[in-house]
Image: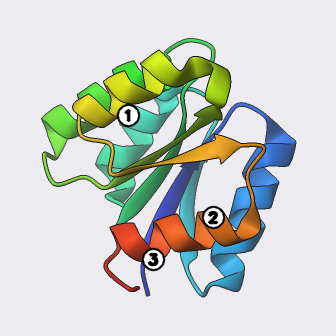
């Protein structure tokens, strides 16, 4: 079973993503509300995939992505953000994010991105 960490400061959005990936048969091993906690939790849990919000308090998703990639260059991260943050999304992709999901998230788009990044498609 693949493991997933969800990084999102909005509780309702975390629950939506969590419900989708659990329905897909994945195990959510960690949830974080900011990038700093995400980096700490990544080191402990080493999930197969991370969904990462970009705009969060304490440490944003791009900085967290860079730190996670420094810890584990093979880390698989999907960034999630509103389309209004297009330049930040491009920056995240340049730092190694594997895919992008626009908010508000659509169930089929989340499933498609997760399957593609984990090579399950």
The residue under label 1 is 39
N-terminal label among 1 and 3? 1
- Residue 41 relative to residue 14: left or right: left
- At x 31% / y 58%, what residue is drawn? 46
Q: CA distance from mark 3 to mark 2?
A: 10 Å
Task: Kindly check if marks 3 and 2 are in contact, taking CB atoms under 8 A apart as contact.
Answer: no
Q: CA distance from mark 2 to mark 1?
A: 25 Å
Q: Position of residue 79 (x, y in %)?
A: 49, 41
Camera sees residue 36? no
**Image: 39 above or below 24:** above
Q: Nearer the viewer, mark 3 or mark 2?
A: 2
The residue under label 3 is 115
Q: Position of residue 99 (x, y in %)?
A: 41, 51
Q: Position of residue 38 (x, y in %)?
A: 46, 36
Q: Which mark is residue 109?
A: 2
Within 10 angstroms of label 2, few (less than 14), some, or many (20 or more) residues? few
Within 10 angstroms of label 1, few (less than 14), some, or many (20 or more) residues? many
Q: Which mark is residue 96?
A: none
Which secondary structure lies at badge 1? helix
**The quarter of the displayed image where residue 18 is located:** bottom right
- At x 52% / y 23%, what residue is drawn? 86
Frontmost residue, 12 versus 38: 12
- At x 54% / y 27%, what residue is drawn? 54
- At x 82% / y 41%, what residue is drawn? 11
Q: Nearer the viewer, mark 1 or mark 3?
A: 3
Q: CA distance from mark 1 to mark 3?
A: 23 Å
Camera sees residue 25? yes
Within 10 angstroms of label 3, few (less than 14), some, or many (20 or more) residues? few
**The quarter of the displayed image where residue 120 is located:** bottom left
N-terminal label among 2 and 1? 1
């Amino acid at each position: 079973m693949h493991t997933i960490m969800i990084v999102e400061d909005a509780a309702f959005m975390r629950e939506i993503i969590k419900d989708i990936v659990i329905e897909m048969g994945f195990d959510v091993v960690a949830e974080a509300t900011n990038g700093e906690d995400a980096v700490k939790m990544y080191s402990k849990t080493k999930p197969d995939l991370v969904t990462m919000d970009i705009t969060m308090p304490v440490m944003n998703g791009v900085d967290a992505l860079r730190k996670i990639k420094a810890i584990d260059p093979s880390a698989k991260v999907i960034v999630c953000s509103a389309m209004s943050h297009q330049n930040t999304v491009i920056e995240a992709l340049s730092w190694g994010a594997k895919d992008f999901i626009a908010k508000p998230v659509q169930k089929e788009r989340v499933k498609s991105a997760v399957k593609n990044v984990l090579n399950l498609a």
